Amino acid sequence: MLKDPSTKYRSFKPVHLRDRQWPDTVLTRAPIWLSTDLRDGNQALIEPMNVERKLRMFRELIRIGFKEIEVGFPSASQTEFDFVRQLIEKNMIPDDVTIQVLTPAREELIRRSFESLKGAKRAIVHVYNAVAPIMRRVVFNMSQDQVLNELAVKHARLARQLADENPGTDWRFEYSPEMFSGTELDFSKRVVDAVVEAFGATREKPLIINLPSTVEHSTPNIFADMVEWMHRNVAKREAIILSIHPHNDRGTGTAAGEFALMAGADRIEGTLFGNGERTGNFDVVNLALNLYSQGVDPQLDFSDIDAIRQVVEYCNQLPVHPRHPYVGDLVYTSFSGSHQDAIKKAFAARKEDDIWEMPYLPLDPKDLGRSYEAVIRVNSQSGKGGISYLLEHEYGLSLPRRLQIEFSQVVQEAMDESGREMTAEDIGGIFTQQYFDAQQPYAYVAHHLVEDSKRNEVELSTEIEIDGRAQKLSGRGNGPIDAFIAGLSQLLGEKIAVVDYHEHAIGSGADAAAATYIELRLGDSKALFGAARDPNIVTASLKAILSGVNRALALRGSVGERRVA
Ligand SMILES: CC(=O)SCCNC(=O)CCNC(=O)[C@H](O)C(C)(C)COP(=O)(O)OP(=O)(O)OC[C@H]1O[C@@H](n2cnc3c(N)ncnc32)[C@H](O)[C@@H]1OP(=O)(O)O
Ligand SMILES: CC(C)C(=O)C(=O)O
């Protein structure tokens, strides 16, 4: 019988931390950020960045506001080495930015890394070695004590010594017990305590201890428990800047990062949009904007997020997914009808300085340089709310509710036929064709209005065309609409009843026009709308009536039977 294949896996173990504090913590300030786009991100690319792409990324990271940037792995290749040299020799590192380089705990590679940093004003040398049982057993064939002494402590001392031999640079150090998330906590603590001593870290000159979930293999609360355990148990917490470096193998890298900061970490390493090994590194943009959406200044500038995405896509030669948090093409877009309706109503109710409270939109797209136009898009899942939102935002047409319902059926039919998404332009085109252009067979030409103030009435003379032939009409009434309806009813030989009337201005000043929507009933037909726009408000009303009559006749299929006086 076949064995259940899942039995080859082992579940992760909980951490015994009964009085854990992190679940009740709220993040109220930005962490220290380190971008590792140029190192961990770069080492995961199909084609690693050349110097030109690395420079482009470096400049973008500075523009965004990163103050610590891991610029490479200079002992890995000449390109990596040359890039670090170029930054230093061409004086390209701003005074408030510190570059960092990564090196394994291996003598020749540490020496080469120091060589690459010659002449730097400031630098962080980041040394790592794996500490997990699997690596001790199958890669190093070393005991815990050997890993601690022969890899970690020995190379920490070497790095310290090389720094002392090059006093022209303001050196800082970082140590990562690689695969921390898969290592016994008491062993990680032993290694960290020993390395803190080897570097001679103090409160004044702290060591960055970076705890990676090199591979994420537990729920994010477990990683947070491990970080809190370290935060509370390391011997010299005051001499440590506690950093974390989550990956995203289980899809919970962001949660792991947030929880670990709540658990006591001061600093976090990640990449823009989460590029990195396998399913990626921790996504800095994701956390920064999560903080921002809670009213916390992330100290990083994502106000033109699409421009940043373009640079990242160019440098990494990898696309960002359309549903990627905060940046994807579709993340501020609502297709479903009830969502569109709620967004439309909330935008209408919102005042300029209100707290952002918007259904289905956790963050104001404008803050990231995105526009509201993309918020609502229309397909077969959409309803009247989205359709009328687009007409209002793109064309300034504010349809009355019953016309919204009537028009959404017209759009639905068109969509069922085409089976594709409708753009604002498509919808504007359908509305124009259905309502504004409904001037056949009856078309407005001119009118003359005389007010009879004694009788409180008006007399309206109108010239229209019927299938291109001129026709004069006249009528009296309590206003121009009433008077026109009287004349037109006589011409048609049918009663025209006005059910509803709405009018509003579009634009202002010399370019202003009136938009008029009139719901009417021709004879015993069902009520429907006509609509028109015109700089003259009376003309707009008369055209809207003709639009309604023409639409009613077309619907009835009785155009041929109309009576002409
Ligand atoms: C989780 C992380 O992201 S860590 C960063 C990983 N990033 C990278 O590896 C990208 C850049 N790396 C490289 O360019 C290369 O791998 C280098 C320069 C680091 C090393 O290259 P090489 O010497 O050719 O070794 P290789 O790439 O095969 O790495 C494995 C070797 O390093 C050894 N090694 C790793 N760490 C150590 C250490 N601290 N001390 C001694 N040996 C070590 C391994 O045991 C293995 O040796 P073996 O081949 O004798 O079994
Ligand atoms: C070197 C360390 C920080 C690393 O990249 C990892 O463990 O993922």
Image (tube, grey):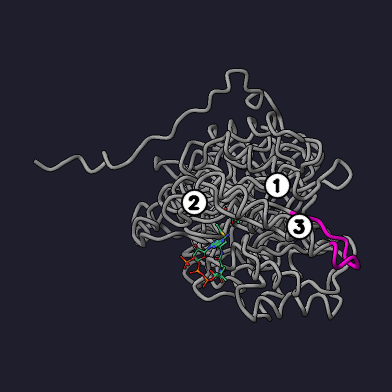
Q: Secondary structure at mark 3?
A: loop
Which residue in the protein does label 3 denote?
507
Residue that numbered label 2 is attached to? 142
Q: Position of residue 461 (x, y in %)?
A: 66, 57
Q: Position of residue 550 (x, y in %)?
A: 47, 57
Q: Nearer the viewer, mark 2 or mark 1?
A: 2
Query: Quick one: label 3 or label 1, which is nearer the N terminus?
Result: 1
Determine the residue located farthest toward the top in the rendered image: 19
Determine which residue is flagged by label 1: 195
> Of helix, strand and loop, which one carries label 2?
loop
The image quadrant where one finds the N terminus is: top left
Asked if the magenta segment contains residue 240, the reply would be: no
The residue that appears at 54% across and 23% down in the rendered structure is 16
Residue 475: x and y, percent?
62, 50
Residue at the spot x=56%, y=35% of the render? 185
Q: Earlier in the sequence, mark 2 or mark 3?
A: 2
Q: Count residues near mark 3 (Cα–Cα under 10 Å), then give few for <14, some for 14-19, many for 20+.
A: few
User: Of 111 and 270, which appears nearest the observer?
Assistant: 111
Report the span colored magenta.
Answer: 164-173
Secondary structure, mark 1, is helix
